């Protein structure tokens, strides 16, 4: 974890943003896979990590906004715990690591909440995303556990989002470490991208790298020669000539900061002319979007810019016709790029998504579009110095979507359906990097990962 000053400062900033009441933070518990003692890889709650740093299951904390005091709740290890899991510092010592002086056994949390309730104090909590946390909150508050998400405190959500959105320097360094692990994952995947190799084998290799150098992957690896399926978690194919392999994979640093990188490699390591045509358009959308990124410009502006580069590239190939800007404002390009340009990155790969995407990426003045494609943009607000984002344009040939639009005659004025067949076998191409918004513009985080046609062909050779 970082030094205690980091957590003390973050909590002090939060105290400065909420006037009264208490906030309960429930850390994650172990989560069973198939029986209670056989658990998934433990992942601490990101807000708990942010404010308290303790990467251990079974803790909770309360911040009191009236007294300005914080308290940690947890149980000391007993002899059985020590025998099976080894010794652990006392709760008192763990609390000191994050700058907290007051501790109590976990069972005392109920009394603290009961007392606050009796005094009719406001009880803030963040929206839970695990069943266990819903049950714990429901039991503490004597409320229906199913209502916990809707009863979460909007004041607390907004305050936490405003703090976590702007990354501190040590956080950026952690994200860079995670990108550097992703460098190894992706270069290994490129080298293995040969005819006859199975997706499973490459998936296993790069998942191993994420665990060998960090805390595993930051999300389940997407790796497939069917990259037209945006989140393809099936790794059952054998690589075939003529296909492209999309690898969308990131790692967690040891302190749980995420990277999220996508590269697309032709099977066999040499681009065909159709693959190259489409790849160069996506690459241009990636590099031009990155080049434009700076404080004040919005992620929505960058999204539209990327879509315009894609539409104009596809027009040169004859797949799109008419005025490019009109095509993009009508949403015709979304046949080929149906997702947003990117999302925030931090302790979560989709940073703070558990707090509600509209609280993170939208505001009273900036509302989510309902247009197909643009509606999936996770963040539409202007960039600020200290924001960390992914930039991840793509072009996809999704047979079912093409068939549907064609049968509906959708955007006939902008789409040349007859020209699509020539490119169908390309499947999907996405190129994703992670950037920091700086005062002057932006910085691409981590060691640059090969992405030009030449760089990729060289690595594959
Ligand atoms: N890396 C997967 C995603 O951004 O949704
Ligand atoms: Mn991403």
Image (cartoon, grey):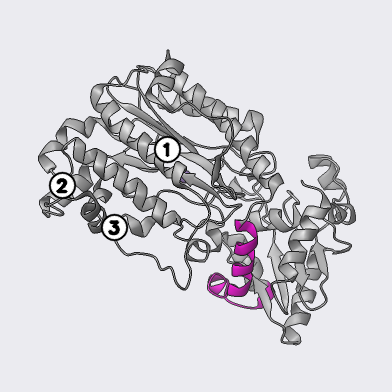
Q: Tell me: 234 left or right of 179.
A: left
Query: Which callout, 3 or 1, points at the residue further toward the start of the chain?
Result: 1
Give the main secondary structure, helix, strand or loop, of the magenta stretch. Answer: helix
**Residue 58: where, in percent of width, then height?**
73, 56
Residue tagged by mark 1?
Answer: 287
Looking at the rendering, the stretch of residues picked out in magenta corresponds to 140-165
Give the answer, above or below, for where 422 lies relative to 148: above
The residue at the point 76 percent across, 81 percent down is 116
The residue at the point 71 percent across, 45 percent down is 170
User: Which residue is at the front of the view, 73 or 125?
Assistant: 125
Give the answer, above or below, for where 405 lies relative to 176: below
**Quadrant position of residue 266:** top left
Please identify, in this view, whether the residue under mark 3 or under mark 1 is nearer the observer. Answer: 1
Q: Does residue 387 belong to the magenta stretch?
A: no
Residue tagged by mark 2?
Answer: 415
User: Which residue is at the front of the view, 145 or 418?
Assistant: 418
């Amino acid at each position: 974890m970082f030094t205690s000053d980091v957590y003390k400062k973050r909590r002090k900033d939060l105290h400065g943003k909420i006037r009264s009441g208490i906030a309960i933070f429930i850390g994650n518990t172990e989560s069973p896979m198939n029986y209670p003692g056989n658990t998934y890889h433990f992942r601490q709650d990101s807000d708990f990590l942010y404010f308290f740093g303790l990467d251990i299951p079974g803790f909770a904390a309360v911040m009191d906004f009236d007294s300005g005091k914080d308290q940690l709740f947890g149980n000391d290890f007993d002899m059985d715990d020590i025998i099976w899991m080894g010794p652990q510092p006392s709760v008192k010592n763990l609390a000191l690591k994050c700058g907290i002086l007051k501790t109590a056994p976990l069972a005392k949390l109920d009394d603290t909440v009961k007392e606050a309730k009796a005094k009719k104090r406001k009880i803030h909590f963040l929206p839970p995303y695990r069943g266990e946390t819903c049950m714990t909150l429901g039991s503490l508050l004597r409320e229906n556990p199913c209502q916990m998400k809707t009863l979460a405190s909007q004041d607390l959500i907004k305050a936490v989002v405003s703090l976590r959105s702007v990354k501190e320097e040590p956080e950026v360094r952690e994200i860079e470490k995670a990108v550097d692990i992703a460098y190894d994952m992706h270069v290994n995947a490129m080298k293995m991208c040969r005819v006859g190799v199975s997706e499973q084998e490459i998936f296993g290799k790069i998942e191993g790298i994420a665990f060998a150098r960090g805390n595993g992957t930051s999300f389940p690896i997407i790796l497939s020669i069917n990259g037209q399926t945006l989140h393809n978690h099936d790794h059952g194919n054998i690589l075939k000539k003529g296909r492209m392999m999309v690898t969308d994979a990131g790692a967690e640093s040891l302190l749980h900061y995420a990277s999220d990188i996508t590269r697309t490699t032709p099977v066999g390591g040499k681009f065909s002319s159709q693959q190259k045509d489409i790849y160069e358009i996506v690459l241009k959308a990636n590099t031009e979007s990155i080049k434009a990124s700076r404080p004040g410009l919005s992620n929505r502006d960058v999204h539209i810019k990327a879509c315009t580069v894609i539409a104009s590239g596809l027009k040169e190939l004859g797949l799109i016709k008419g005025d490019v800007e009109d095509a993009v404002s009508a949403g015709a390009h979304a046949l080929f790029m149906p997702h947003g340009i990117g999302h925030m990155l931090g302790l979560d790969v989709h940073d703070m998504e558990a707090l509600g995407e509209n609280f993170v990426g939208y505001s009273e003045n900036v509302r989510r579009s309902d247009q197909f494609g643009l509606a999936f943009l996770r963040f539409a607000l202007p960039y600020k110095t200290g924001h960390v984002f992914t930039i991840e344009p793509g072009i996809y040939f999704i047979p079912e979507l093409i068939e549907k639009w064609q049968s509906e005659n959708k955007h006939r004025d902008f789409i040349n359906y007859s020209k699509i067949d020539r490119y169908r076998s390309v499947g999907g191409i996405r190129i994703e990097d992670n950037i920091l918004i700086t005062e002057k513009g932006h910085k691409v985080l981590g060691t640059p990962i090969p992405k030009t046609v030449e760089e990729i062909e060289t690595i594959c050779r």
